[in-house]
Image (spheres, rainbow, N blue to C red):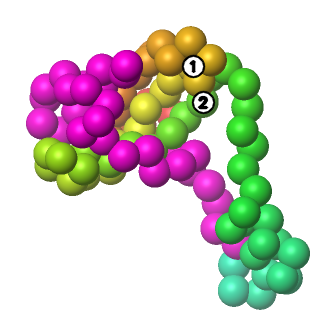
Amino acid sequence: MLLIHCPYCGELRDEQEYRYAGEAFIQRPGLACTDEQWGDYVFNRTNPKGKTVEQWAHAAGCRKLFVVERNNVTNEIYAVRTFESYKEQA
């Protein structure tokens, strides 16, 4: 079981209140992309083992998206941030 701290609500809640929304910061190809580039964008993800940067939604709460840095092997959560604060840190 994961306990995730929502950066907007300020509460620590069970993962059942949240929805995984995929890998964060995927670059969408431009309008002039090929079918292969579009297919790669839609279907392929890096799927690394270990530390990942993901987006999650607080579905049963504020319904906002935020960034979670987590180890997908151990489920250890390193950081939970809003998208705005994550971009400021980079």
Q: Which mark is residue 52?
A: 2
Q: Which mark is residue 71?
A: 1
The foreground one among 82 and 64 is: 64
Which picture quadrant has residue 39?
Answer: bottom right
**Residue 88 seen in render:** no
User: Please, which residue is most extreme toward the bottom here?
Assistant: 32
Whether the magenta-drawn stretch holds residue 22 is answered as: yes
Name the kind of residue labelled 1 in the image.
Asn
- Check whether the beta carbons of the residues at disc 1 and disc 2 lie within 8 A of each other: yes
Q: Which residues are magenta?
A: 1-29
Whether the magenta-drawn stretch holds residue 64 is answered as: no
Q: How many residues crowd mark 2 within 10 Å: few (<14), some (14–19), many (20+)? A: some
Instruction: Write the residue at 57% across / 19% down.
Output: 71
Instruction: Write the residue at 32% across / 31% down.
Output: 15
Measured as percent of width and height from the top left, residue 41 is found at 72, 65
Q: Quadrant of the N terminus?
A: top left
Which picture quadrant has residue 28?
Answer: bottom right
